[in-house]
Image (tube, helix red, strand yellow):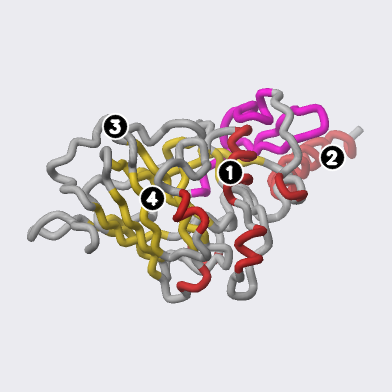
Amino acid sequence: MTVLRNSIPVLFLATILALPAQAQRSEGGRGAGAVGPSGAGAGVSNFERIAPSGNGSTGSSGFGHSGIGGLGMGVVMPPRPNGAPPVQHMSYFHKTRVLVPPRWWPRCAVVPSGAFWGSRDLFAEIQWLSRAGFIPVTAVDPTAESLEDYAFWPAGWKAYGFAIPPGGKLQVEVQHTKLGWFRLMAVDKWGTPGPGMLQAANAFSPVMITVSNPGQVASAVYVIVDDPGWWSSKEDPYRLLIRRDWDPYQTDLSKVKMVAGLWGASPSVSARFSRPSLTGPAVFPH
């Protein structure tokens, strides 16, 4: 009996100490707060991880309640586009239904070719992903003329929302030390190229795109920076130059909603915006 009494506290203590290790192994070794190289995962550490199972139930890593997003609500996800491997889990920004973009493809190891861009169908992937929640977008200030940022890691892309007045034209240019690895795309609130965006969507590896609003009311356009080589980082961000053919200080675009369709608000904690100079508004062409 003496041996048994002395063993109970020891066994209880051993069980408690083993719990963190078991929890860490269940996360696959990286954990929910894992970040990419060179700080490329900053701002994405506080999220929920939802793991799909065969019956549509979910599990949570403890960062909040489970059961959010399409998988948690019992929505059956169709197969991924183009025969891509299934996603093993979905992650969400804490207490939201905004998804943390997952890794869809291996890192691109050579300078992208036309065949590569054709196989990397972000349009289809974003629409597929939207069935489980909202796609994160960072709204760009109507007066900003440039910004510096880096893509989600390891997804390799990030989206920005711009408001355009009726008849307005917007030009966006990406700059980076490895420019040949980047491209820009423009889509509407449903993640597809809308009116005034088709030329930008079909261009080969565009580093500068021009989109227009042929409608009668102000609307939003979403520009995606695609970085499949994961070259952008906190130490080496890309830069977006923004040019408009309207005066941003004389045009009221406050009623344009960026959170619409499949997009959900997710301000980038890493984006650094620059306003126009005091000499006048940004003019297209700059």
Q: Quadrant of residue 37?
A: bottom right
Q: Residue furthest top?
A: 73
Q: Secondary structure at mark 1?
A: helix
- Res. 269 mark: 4
> From mark 2 to mark 3, how far is it between C-alphas?
75 Å
Image position of 103 with respect to 10: above or below: below
Viewer-nearest of labels 3 and 1?
3
Residue under circle 1? Answer: 126
Q: Which residues are magenta?
A: 44-73
> From mark 4 to mark 3, how far is it between C-alphas?
30 Å
Q: Nearer the viewer, residue 152 or 166?
A: 166
Compare marks 4 and 2 and give the one earlier in the sequence: 2
> From mark 2 to mark 1, how far is it between C-alphas?
55 Å
Viewer-nearest of labels 4 and 2?
4
- Res. 165 mark: none
> From mark 1 to mark 4, how far is it between C-alphas?
22 Å
The kind of residue on which mark 3 rests is Val
Say which quadrant the C terminus sits in.
bottom left
The kind of residue on which mark 2 rests is Ser
Residue under circle 3? Answer: 217
Compare marks 3 and 1 and give the one earlier in the sequence: 1
Residue located 59% across and 74% down the image: 111
Compare marks 2 and 1 and give the one earlier in the sequence: 2
Residue located 50% across and 73% down the image: 180
The kind of residue on which mark 4 rests is Val
Q: Residues within 10 Å of mark 4 (few under 14, many from 20)?
A: few
